[in-house]
Image (cartoon, rainbow, N blue to C red):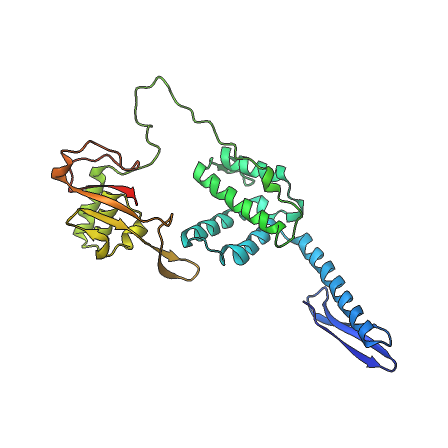
Amino acid sequence: MAKGSVRKKGKKWYGRFYIEDESGRKVQKEFAGTESKAETEAMLRKAIADYEEKQFVGKAENITVGDMLDMWVEEELKPGNLSNGTVMSYQGTVNRIKQYPIGKRKLKTVTADHLQAFIDFLSYGGTNPDGTTSKPMSKGYMLLFSAVLQNSFRFAVFPKKLITFNPMQYVKLRGRKQETDIFSDSEEDTSSIPTITHEQFQKLEEFLKAKDNPALLPVQIAYYTGLRIGEVCGLTWQDINLEEQYLTVRRSMRYNGTRHTTEVGTTKRSKVRTCLLYTSDAADELPCVNLGGRRDTKKTDLIAWDTET
């Protein structure tokens, strides 16, 4: 906020405050008030308010979508209570949006049609301005882009008041229809989650053993239990019950890219869950079950699946 003062010259009071000229330098502006100090101070407050309102409108006219996204990251995203992984994911999405023409468009000129065309381009793919071809994005990426745009444009409406309404509220995600051969006997496309085969895991295991790599144990635990890598790194001996053959997932370790530190916090959904463990001998008496899309249980060293508590 601009600062000002009043001073008396002769019988009159004068108000003065600093403004920013075209070159960005601070210069002093003075005006004549009245013979009353209180009246001149009131005139000064009004003059400062009028100046700041005009300056704000002038700056808002020049703000691009990219500028607004940067403001959202610094003022709302980073200080918020989202997990570090989500913050880093949103920041990466912001950087990608700024690379598209929509990122350079003036914020006040953006309409729902512009945003719908951008979302459709991401969803269906198309030709970039440089002539290259952009492939359609997955549903997961589409939801990520949509979340960033929804939250940032809401932020631009309030509390920033850069625009008067949120055009993203009229934008819809229109995904591609998946083509499937309903007469095919192949079962290759029945699983949408990419996984490695047990043979591939064994090769990875042998490679890590040969290198005496400390990542071997975390990789083995992650493969046989289906835990996220951060959850594996967050395990302690108090979480392991070898006698009753289960482990408890209470926390997760993640890297905070903003602070450049490793932190331990809650799991992704802030829930505690247990993971039942079985030896390969016990697996012979169990049915073949799917571990959340990761792989089917076979006769291996350790069998596991999750149950929430």
Q: Residue lying farthest bottom?
A: 10
Q: Nearer the viewer, residue 28 or 210?
A: 28
| Position of residue 38 measured from the top left corner of the image (x, y, whole percent) | 80, 74
Which percent across, then down, holds residue 75? 54, 58
Residue 139 as seen in the image, left or right of residue 284: right
Q: Would you place residue 92 above or below residue 139 in this image?
A: below
Between 245 and 11, the one lying in front of the other is: 245
Say which quarter of the image contains residue 11: bottom right
Q: Residue at x 21, y 47 (%)?
A: 246
Could you say where residue 162 lies in the image, as x and y percent from the top left? 65, 52
Whether residue 195 is situated above or below residue 49 in the rendered picture: above
Work out which quarter of the rendered image holds the C terminus and state it. top left
Q: Residue extending furthest front? A: 309
Q: Position of residue 99 (x, y in %)?
A: 53, 47
With 73 as the anchor, is 15 left or right in this view? right
From what the image shows, is residue 171 above or below residue 215?
above
Residue 254, visible in the rendered structure: yes
Which residue is drawn at the image coordinates 17% and 42% (left, top)? 278
Residue at x 40% of width, y 61% of height: 260
Q: Left of 260 or right of it: where is 125?
A: right
Q: Considering depth in this image, is 295 or 244 the residue closer to the camera?
A: 244
The N terminus - image quarter:
bottom right
Q: Is residue 106 visible?
A: no
Seen from the viewer's position, the closer of residues 140 and 203 is 140
